[in-house]
Image (tube, rainbow, N blue to C red):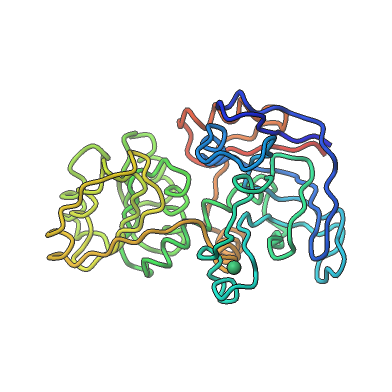
Amino acid sequence: MRAWQLTDTKGIGSYALNEVDEPEPGPGEVRVKISHSALNHLDLWVAQGLPAPKHLPHIGGADGAGVIDAVGEGVSGFDIGDEVIIDPSLSCGSCAFCRNDEIVYCDSFQILGEHRPGTFTEKIVIPTINAVRKPGSMPWEVAGSFGLVTATALRMMERAGLKPEQTLLVVGVGGGVSAAAALLGIAMRTRVYVTSRSQGKIDWAIDQGAAGGFDSEGDFGAEMAALGGADVVIDNVGPATIRQSMRAVKKGGRIAICGSTSGPKMELTLPTLFFRQLELIGSSMANHGQFARATTWIGTVGARAPVSKVFDFDALPQALEYLENEEQVGKVALRHPE
Ligand SMILES: [Zn+2]
């Protein structure tokens, strides 16, 4: 079988389509023949060595869905032919955090495609806890692409205590997790506002059901405050927008952060933080329960999970270039060989 392997960490050009051995499932594992996978910015960063894979060559890709074609010893509940979505979060399974489904705090927490061989392959072996049943009506390109961003967004919203009828502001709605947060917020019947530097992306969010949008580079803090302020702000942009986000949020409100696309360090005006009694919440990835709930939001409740473009498996480098250009909103998926 073939897999896209990073042979170096010099960017997209370091991915090579190689012939590799078919993996065999061990005890408690299943093998999935992947129908569709999808790209995340993580795949661009890992290709640049940020972070560098532990072993080269390394198979990238965190998202995927497919059909079980082999089961290991002792597996119950799954059979050959079952359609599953791959939850990319791996952990030790036995520490106190893992037993409480707080796997994101496990010392051995890992992500497929970053620390372990990922989904840009024809077949992958995963523990059964990482196999989530695909809702029958969910299209394959959606099943293979919503997982990482939607589960990550859902965890942020759960941690921030967002409730129906409240106001959610999503800063920089073009990002993958941010777009997923806006779409989940709309499905949860919160009032969603967005910011972007692109009027096209603001228009996209309004088309999806957002109440309005602001220019990320403008005075969106005051604009949001004039509309009553936000109960929760999701800001994965960071230093470039945090001042405005702290003005946009209501007193006692929460700002959740799972990334910082404008740089790793920022200056905080602490009196704004304490006089306005704000909470800053860091978040990263999601637990298995959150992945399962994200699947329910997309598969059963009908939250949208748009796929902007599907590339053939052989065209991964072109798909990564398309992702890097950031003109799309929605996921970039790969259709694997039948
Ligand atoms: Zn653990």
- Rendered residue at 16%/58% (across/down): 270
Expressed as whole percent of the image width and height from the top left, the position of residue 260 reads 36, 45
Seen from this angle, which residue lies furthest top?
Answer: 13
From the viewer's side, name the closer residue of 125 and 334.
125
Expressed as whole percent of the image width and height from the top left, the position of residue 76 reads 83, 71
From the viewer's side, name the closer residue of 333 and 130.
130
Q: Quadrant of ligand 1?
A: bottom right
Identify the image quadrant of the N terminus: top right
Instruction: Say left or right for 281 vs 313.
Output: left
- Rendered residue at 29%/61% (across/down): 280
The quarter of the displayed image where residue 298 is located: bottom right
Number of marks present in the image shown:
0
Expressed as whole percent of the image width and height from the top left, the position of residue 85 reads 69, 55
The quarter of the displayed image where residue 103 is located: bottom right
Instruction: Say left or right for 11 vs 60.
Output: left
- State whether residue 78 is above or below residue 326: below
Identify the image quadrant of the C terminus: top right
- Rendered residue at 33%/59% (across/down): 191
- Rendered residue at 58%/37% (across/down): 332
From the viewer's side, name the closer residue of 193 and 337.
337
Instruction: Say left or right for 285 vs 195.
Output: right
- State whether residue 317 is above or below residue 32: above
- State whether residue 229 is above or below residue 222: below
- State whether residue 249 is above or below residue 205: below
Expressed as whole percent of the image width and height from the top left, the position of residue 329 reads 47, 39
